[in-house]
Amino acid sequence: MAATPAGRAVKRLVVLVSGSGTNLQALLDEIERTGAEEYGARIVAVGADRTGVEGLARAERAGLPTFVCRVKDHGTRQEWDAALAEAVAAHRPDLVVSAGFMKIVGKEFLARFGGRFVNTHPALLPSFPGAHGVRDALAYGARVTGCTVHFVDDGVDTGPIIAQGVVEVRDEDDESALHERIKEVERRLLVEVVGRLARNGYRIEGRKVVIQ
Ligand code: GRF
């Protein structure tokens, strides 16, 4: 088994995507740049809830195994959740990263991966949770917004916060311009946070995440 410079095992990451996968790409690029041993983790598989997305193409170009688990291929949401958990578990991840994965996972998934399932959200939680964090911050008239990397719990974007990045809202911003600037900060933050979690280990104490 590969080891980090500190002699610890390189952690296994499964990344879940639904779209363009630029956060996934940032992880791939950093691991390629530093080497998995130095970074502390490597991506062992990429999963999606839909076919034909650029995130999956990025994984394929990187030579990684991919899997797709679509809600509509399962009788109930619960069955989908169990199938997703099974597909992820097959790759024996230490950490699962939701990088623009636009589905809420259920009980079975959280029973298996709770406390090691990391999400990135394009707003400063607890403000503007949900699928339209950028649009909602803009519509509210917030002057600063940003991104939040957090552990997933059974609420919608309510889990313990690991790190946040701040982005100023400009007068001329529309949703897409603001989201692009947020994503620049978000990619750097996600890469930094996942590496630190993998290399140092962490504990979750109530709402606090302590990285050792
Ligand atoms: C990110 O801003 C993420 O927070 C949001 O969707 C975006 C995904 O971007 N949920 P990408 O697919 O990584 O490019």
Image (cartoon, rainbow, N blue to C red):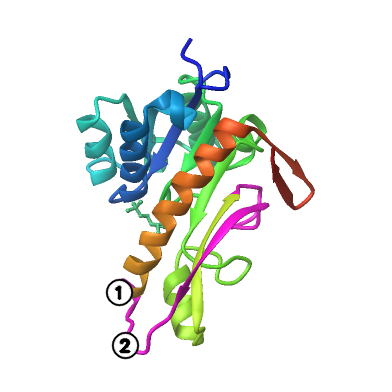
Check residue 155 for magenta coloring.
yes
Q: Position of residue 39 (x, y in %)?
A: 45, 32
Q: Is residue 22 above or below residue 145?
A: above
Q: Amino acid at mark 2?
A: Glu
Q: Amino acid at mark 1?
A: Ala
Q: Which residue is mark 2?
A: 172
Where residue 191 appears, as percent x and y from the top left, is: 44, 45
User: Can see residue 76?
Assistant: no
Q: Which residue occupies 47% across, 19% down? A: 90
Please say if the residues under marks 1 and 2 sit with CB atoms less than 8 Å apart. Answer: yes
Q: Circle 1: is it few (<14), some (14-19), or many (20+) Cα within 10 Å?
A: few
What percent of the width, then of the height, locates residue 179?
Answer: 36, 68
125 left or right of 1 in image? right
Magenta residues, start to end: 151-177
Tally of numbered tags: 2
Q: Is residue 169 visible?
A: yes
In which quarter of the view is residue 31 placed? top left
